[in-house]
C-alpha cells in the first residue's frame, strides 16, 4: 500500500507561502509587502503562482475582519476561542470561498491539508466542518448575516468593508470636515471604503532631468495629475533599465504631488537650500533632489532611524552628486539650524490611514490610542521646521492620512501657535497648476474636497491615489 503524501507535498506552494506570511504578520508584526516577495523569490514561483500567492495574502489580510465574522457564525464560537494558526488557515480559505473564484473542493481540501501541516489532527476535522458550513450558503447570504449582527450604521460598514469601527468613524469625520454634505456622506464613505479594498495600480515616477516617461520601454499610462508619473499597465517594472538605474522609481501619484507641491510652489532661485525633515524611506527625497538639481537648489535629507536612513541613501544614489543624509532628531533641527532653509518638507509620521489599500494589514495594527502621540510628534516637527526656515521660506506639511487631528487640526494649530509669523499659502492653486501640466480638466470631484484653498486632501475613490494631505505655509519676512 502506498504511503500517503506529506501535507507539504499536497498543498500548492502559493497557498503555503500565503499562510506563512499571514502567520508571520500576526505573530511577528512582519510586513507583508516585504516578506512576501522574498518568499516568492526563494520558492521560485512562476508568474501565475506568484500572482495567486499575492492575491491570497493581501486579500486575506485586507478582509480578515469580515472573514472572522463569517467564521464565527459558521463555527458557532468567537474567533478568540479558535487556535490562532487554525484561524489563519480558515481566513485564507474564506478568502478563496467568498472573495475569489476558486473551486470549492480545491479551497477546502488544501485548507484541510494546511491545517494538518501546522496544527493537530483534530484541527483538520474542525477546519473541514467550518468550511463545509461556509460552502452551504452563497456569499451574499453570508454578507447579509454578517451585517445583520452589527448594532449601528458604522458597525455595519466596519463589518461589510472589513475596517475597524474607529477608522470608519475617523473617515466619516474627515469627509464631513472636507465639505461632503450630510445627504451624500454615507454614499461617499462607502465609495472610500470600497476603494480601500481594491489593490492599487503600480505607480511609477520618472525623476525629472534623469528619465523621460515618454521614452520608457514598458506599457504605461500617464498619471492624471502628476506630470512625471505613470501607471504601469504591462510588463515587469523591475525589467526597465531606468528602474534598475534608480531614475524611475515606484511611487504613488499622491506622493509625487506632495513632493512637487513644495518644489513647484514658487520659482526656484539658484542656491536655495532645501530640507526633507522626515525623509525615510526616500521616495519623496529622490523626487525633490531631482527637482532641486534642475533648479540649482541643494537638498539635504534627514532620517533619524539608521535602517531607514540607508534606504534614503539608496534612493538618492541615482541623482548626480547625491544629497547629504543626516540622522538627526527632526524635532531638534530648528534649534540647531534656525533660519537655514528656503524650503522644508515635513512628511510627518502618521497613522497611515490614507494608504490602507496598499498596506492591507495596517488597518488592524493601528488604534485610536496611536493618534494622540503622533499628533504631538507632528506638532513638534512642524515647529522645528518653521524655526529652521529662512524668512520667506516655504513649508510643506504632508501626511498619508485624512484623520482630522493629523490634517486640518495641525494646520489650525500651527497658525494659532505662530500667529502672523507664518501664513497659509494657496495649496489648491499650486496643485492645480501642477496638474494643468497634464491638461487635466478639473470637475467638481477634481477639487479634491479642497476644504480651504490652503489645504488639499487627495482621496483613493476620487483621485485614485493614497489619501495624501498637503498644506503649504510661508514664513513671514523679518521686515514685515
Image (cartoon, rainbow, N blue to C red):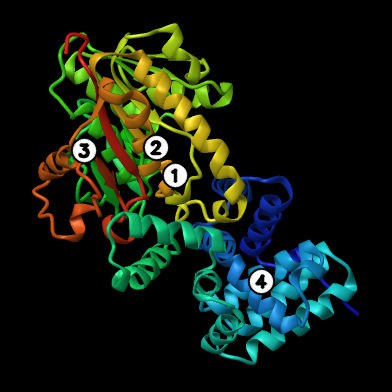
Crowd tier of the residue under label 3, counting other residues whose Cα lies within 10 Å: few below 14, some 14–19, many 20 or above: many
Q: Position of residue 124 (x, y in %)?
A: 82, 76
Compared to residue 10, the image places residue 98 above or below, namely below
Q: Earlier in the sequence, mark 2 or mark 4?
A: 4
- Disc assigned to residue 410: 2
The residue under label 3 is 427
Locate the N terminus and report the quarter of the image it occupies.
bottom right
> What x and y, as percent, mark residue 355?
44, 50
Determine whether, in the image, residue 209 is placed left or right of residue 440: right
Q: For the residues labelled 1 and 3, say whether their Cβ atoms are less than 8 Å apart.
A: no
Q: Secondary structure at mark 3?
A: helix
**Image quadrant assignment for residue 383:** top left
Residue at image location 51% in from the left, 51% down from the top? 359
Judging by the rendered image, the residue that carries numbered circle 4 is: 68
Q: Locate residue 237: give its quadrant.
A: top left
Disc 2 to disc 4, how far (Cα)?
36 Å
Q: Earlier in the sequence, mark 1 or mark 3?
A: 1
What label sits on residue 405 in the rendered view?
Answer: 1
Circle 1 Cα neighbour tier, 10 Å, few/some/many (<14 / 14–19 / ≥20):
some
Is mark 2 in CB contact (under 8 Å) with mark 3? no
Of the numbered discs 4 and 3, the one sitting upstream in the chain is 4
At mark 4, the secondary structure is helix
Please indicate whether residue 48 sits to the left or right of residue 300 in the image.
right
Examine the rendering and report whether any part of residue 123 can be seen.
yes
Of 217 and 293, nearer the camera is: 293
Residue occupying the point 58% across, 43% down: 370
Look at the picture and state if 338 lies above or below 25: above
Q: Residues within 10 Å of mark 4 (few under 14, many from 20)?
A: many
Tell me if residue 440 comes above or below residue 53 in the rendering: above
Amino acid at each position: 500500500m502506498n504511503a500517503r503524501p506529506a501535507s507539504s507535498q499536497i498543498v500548492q506552494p502559493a497557498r503555503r507561502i500565503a499562510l506563512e506570511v499571514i502567520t508571520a504578520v500576526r505573530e511577528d508584526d512582519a510586513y507583508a509587502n516585504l516578506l512576501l516577495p522574498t518568499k516568492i523569490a526563494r520558492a521560485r514561483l512562476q508568474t501565475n503562482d506568484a500572482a495567486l500567492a499575492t492575491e491570497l495574502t493581501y486579500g486575506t489580510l485586507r478582509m480578515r475582519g469580515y472573514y472572522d465574522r463569517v467564521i464565527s457564525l459558521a463555527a458557532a464560537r468567537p474567533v478568540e476561542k479558535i487556535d490562532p494558526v487554525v484561524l489563519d488557515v480558515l481566513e485564507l480559505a474564506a478568502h478563496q470561498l467568498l472573495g475569489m473564484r476558486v473551486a470549492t473542493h480545491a479551497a477546502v481540501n488544501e485548507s484541510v491539508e494546511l491545517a494538518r501541516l501546522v496544527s493537530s489532527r483534530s484541527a483538520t476535522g474542525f477546519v473541514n466542518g467550518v468550511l463545509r458550513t461556509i460552502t452551504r450558503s452563497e456569499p451574499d447570504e453570508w454578507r447579509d448575516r454578517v451585517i445583520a449582527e452589527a448594532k449601528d450604521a458604522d458597525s455595519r460598514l466596519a463589518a461589510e468593508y472589513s475596517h475597524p469601527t474607529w477608522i470608519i468613524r475617523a473617515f466619516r469625520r474627515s469627509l464631513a470636515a472636507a465639505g461632503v454634505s450630510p445627504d451624500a456622506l454615507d454614499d461617499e464613505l462607502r465609495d472610500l471604503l470600497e476603494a480601500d479594498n481594491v489593490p492599487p495600480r503600480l505607480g511609477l515616477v520618472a525623476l525629472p532631468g534623469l528619465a523621460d516617461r515618454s521614452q520608457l520601454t514598458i506599457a504605461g499610462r500617464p498619471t492624471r495629475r502628476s506630470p512625471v508619473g505613470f501607471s504601469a499597465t504591462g510588463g515587469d517594472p523591475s525589467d526597465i533599465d531606468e528602474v534598475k538605474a534608480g531614475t524611475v522609481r515606484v511611487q504613488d501619484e499622491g506622493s509625487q504631488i506632495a513632493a512637487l507641491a513644495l518644489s513647484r510652489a514658487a520659482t526656484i532661485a539658484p542656491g536655495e537650500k532645501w530640507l526633507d525633515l522626515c525623509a525615510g524611506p526616500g521616495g519623496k527625497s529622490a523626487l525633490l533632489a531631482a527637482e532641486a538639481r534642475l533648479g540649482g537648489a541643494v537638498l539635504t535629507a534627514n532620517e533619524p532611524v539608521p535602517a531607514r536612513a540607508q534606504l534614503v541613501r539608496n534612493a538618492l544614489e541615482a541623482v548626480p552628486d547625491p544629497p547629504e543624509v543626516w540622522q538627526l532628531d527632526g524635532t531638534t533641527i530648528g534649534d540647531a539650524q534656525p533660519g537655514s532653509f528656503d524650503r522644508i518638507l515635513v512628511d510627518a509620521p502618521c497613522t497611515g490611514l490614507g494608504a490602507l489599500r496598499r498596506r492591507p494589514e495596517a488597518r488592524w495594527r493601528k488604534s485610536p490610542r496611536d493618534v494622540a502621540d503622533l499628533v504631538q510628534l507632528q506638532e513638534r516637527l512642524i515647529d522645528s521646521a518653521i524655526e529652521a526656515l529662512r524668512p520667506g521660506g516655504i513649508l510643506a506639511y504632508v501626511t498619508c492620512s485624512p484623520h482630522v487631528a493629523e490634517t486640518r487640526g495641525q494646520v489650525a494649530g500651527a497658525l494659532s501657535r505662530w500667529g502672523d509669523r507664518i501664513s497659509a499659502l494657496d495649496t489648491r492653486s499650486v496643485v492645480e497648476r501642477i496638474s494643468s501640466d497634464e491638461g487635466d480638466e478639473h470637475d467638481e470631484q477634481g477639487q479634491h474636497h479642497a476644504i480651504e484653498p490652503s489645504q488639499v486632501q487627495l482621496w483613493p475613490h476620487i483621485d485614485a491615489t493614497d489619501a495624501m494631505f498637503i498644506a503649504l505655509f510661508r514664513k513671514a519676512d523679518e521686515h514685515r
